[in-house]
Image (spheres, rainbow, N blue to C red):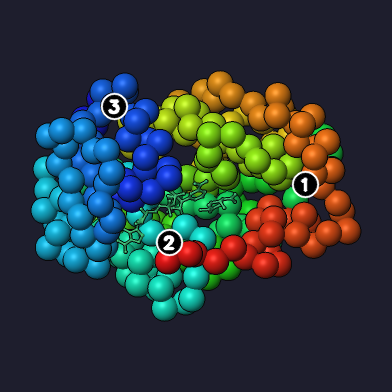
Amino acid sequence: PAPRTVLLTGAAGGLGTLMRGLLPAYGYDLRLFDVRPVEGAPDGAKVFTADLTDRDALREAVHGVDAIMHLAGISLEAPFEKILRSNIEGTYHLYEAAREEDVRRIVFASSNHAVGFTPRPQGTPVPSESLIPVDTPRRPDTYYGLSKCFGEDLAQLYADLHGIDTVSVRIGSCFPEPTTVRMLSVWMSPADGARLFHAALSAGTTGHTVVYGSSANTRLWWDLSGARALGYEPQDDSEPYAAALIAAQGELDPDNPAHANLGGQFCTEPPVWPY
Ligand code: NAI
Ligand code: 15L
């Protein structure tokens, strides 16, 4: 049976805000956790305003939940010390709280930037045999991407040692609409995001499973079969946005290093976390 009570970390962020709007329709009762206040939380929602390094707050938030969706963390490149604290130490504290409170399912928001230096496959559409598999070698493009590699390995350790199941979703770009030509390949519509997170929360025993997270885009770069094996059936495709984006920005340029790899501009001038 699908878990009912789910702790959503990073609930004040962009993806957290989209998911707290969409996931209750799947029957989840969400608890919300973020270091920033969660604007517009429904009346009566359990909201925890605390840092991921505050173990007491985490334990209280995690106590009694069926599963955790772990979105909190720095979501772009930042100085190593900040990444270390929020993404590396913070994710460790979350897993320790889950172990202490016996929570058996975590969905971890990993990122395409864990494999960002992987050359993007060629072709429109990319032939299925050239889609990037989940077991492609890690090639982080930033300290941020490196922290997602750490999170995936931490999840593997807690699966092997403590029997906690994690689905690590290497999310592409989950925003209301694709806004760049690269996003035509990596976009995950918010509705498909909710479908995939629901599948990841409710699938049978997963151990630690890594999947890519995107819609069924015509210009897809990676293999979605792992996500589909969890029960995910994407309904969206970025293609209706393609003509306007390509007219405005041009096709991806093979001579532009910011277009050469999965991680896009993170591989050249990574966008820096603003806070
Ligand atoms: P965001 O930056 O809008 O939200 C992240 C939230 O985490 C913020 O509300 C922030 O206050 C909170 N946070 C950061 N450090 C914290 C700490 N130490 N303790 C407690 N809360 C903390 O990012 P977004 O776009 O919502 O992404 C959510 C997650 O999904 C992130 O882990 C990000 O790396 C991952 N992701 C998102 C993608 C996307 O397309 N939106 C793509 C790939 C991964
Ligand atoms: C990410 O990992 C970021 O959190 C998100 O803001 C986007 O930049 C996304 O990747 C992307 O690759 O487009």
Task: Determine the image quadrant of residue 23.
Answer: top left
Residue 24 seen in the current view: yes
Residue 8 vertical position relative to residue 158 in the rendered view, above or below: above
**Spot occupied by residue 183 in the image (x, y as percentages of width and height):** 66, 42
Q: CA distance from mark 1 to mark 3?
A: 36 Å
Few, some or many residues within 10 Å of mark 2 (<14, 14–19, 20+): many
Q: Please give left or right for residue 272 compared with residue 151 in the image.
A: right
Q: Earlier in the sequence, mark 3 or mark 2?
A: 3
Provide the residue designation for mark 3: 24
Few, some or many residues within 10 Å of mark 1 (<14, 14–19, 20+): some
**Spot occupied by residue 129 in the image (x, y as percentages of width and height):** 75, 38
Closest to the camera, between mark 1 and mark 3, is 3
**Spot occupied by residue 139 in the image (x, y as percentages of width and height):** 63, 63
* In front of the other: 96 or 48: 48
Report the disc number at residue 178. Answer: none
Secondary element under disc 1, as helix, strand or loop, is: loop
Q: CA distance from mark 3 to mark 2?
A: 25 Å
Provide the residue designation for mark 1: 121
Report the disc number at residue 74. Answer: 2
Q: Earlier in the sequence, mark 1 or mark 3?
A: 3
Secondary element under disc 2, as helix, strand or loop, is: loop
The quadrant in which the N terminus is found is top left
Closest to the camera, between mark 2 and mark 1, is 2
Residue 163 seen in the current view: no
